[in-house]
Image (cartoon, grey):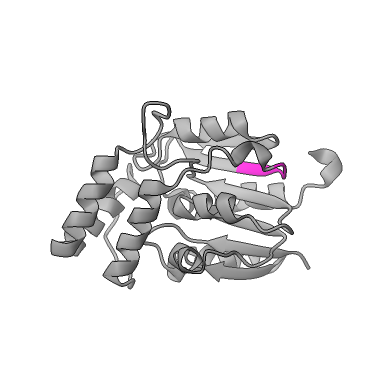
Amino acid sequence: MKSVLVISGWAHGIEHIRPMGNALADRFDVRLMTGSDVLEARHLPEADYIVTGSMGGLLAMELLPPRCQKLVLISSTAKFCADEGYPCGTPERILKRMILQLQRHPEAVLADFYRNVHHPYAHTCASVGEPLETLVAGLDYLLASDVRARVPSIGIPVLLLHGALDRIIPPAAAEWLHAHLPNSELKLFEDDGHALPAHHFEDVIQETLQFLQKAPDDE
């Protein structure tokens, strides 16, 4: 049985990715990891396939294990922060402000973050259960992360799923990845934002299964 590693994004724990893991478990040997655990270890275990997104997508591209044969990136980017040469990112000042505000009003910061994550759908903020220092470490990583130089060397098939209304990572970031990855497919969800598995769960699972189970001759 092929193995699948599912990795969560920033401020998302195991409970956020467990439904996806359960949906894949009857066809694959599934392992779940939080993005914060991967960031702390700076290592990914061997897996045939990886399904992840956002901060997890950056970590997967940076730390891609040799055995990995396919990669599914949901709401992902090669560089989280925008600069003069890469406009399809978040301004650095937003992350720096979040780091400062986490020290004073963590609940408000996370509530605002989740509202943007789930736009255009309503969402009630839930407790993350991660220590403050872990959240700050994730934001520090996102401030510095940049895997653009690595992207052209990722020769395995990559499926890119992205929401056209994403307020966290603009869809232009997925289009940049699609243009620079040697072997990629891109599907845009016109009526959704960053949290695709939360609001288009069945569609995301169907696209993922179809991609992972596709025979090499069909690619």
Seen at 66% across and 63% down, the residue is: 4
Seen at 57% across and 38% down, the residue is: 149
Drawn side of residue 112 relative to residue 37, left or right = left
Drawn side of residue 17 relative to residue 141, left or right = right
| Residue range corresponding to the magenta coloring | 155-159
Task: Using the image as rendered, state which of residue 177 and residue 152 is in the foreground.
Answer: 152
Q: Position of residue 25 (x, y in %)?
A: 65, 69
Quadrant where the image shows the N terminus:
bottom right
Drawn side of residue 95 relative to residue 72, left or right = left
Task: Using the image as rendered, state which of residue 170 and residue 88 is in the foreground.
Answer: 88
Task: Using the image as rendered, state which of residue 12 and residue 26 is in the foreground.
Answer: 12
Q: Is 212 above or below relative to 173?
A: below
Q: What is the total number of numbered labels drawn onto the structure image?
A: 0
Q: Can residue 83 be seen here?
A: yes
Q: Position of residue 26 (x, y in %)?
A: 69, 68
Quadrant where the image shows the C terminus:
top right
- Quadrant in the picture for residue 89: top left
Seen at 46% across and 70% down, the residue is: 14
Q: Position of residue 59 (x, y in %)?
A: 52, 54
Q: Is 72 above or below relative to 17?
A: above
Task: Using the image as rendered, state which of residue 135 and residue 3 is in the foreground.
Answer: 135
* Main SS, magenta residues: loop
Residue occupying the far left of the picture: 104
- Quadrant in the picture for residue 114: bottom left
Q: Can residue 190 be seen here?
A: no
Q: Position of residue 54 (x, y in %)?
A: 46, 50
Q: Is 86 above or below relative to 49?
A: above
In magenta segment, residue 172: no
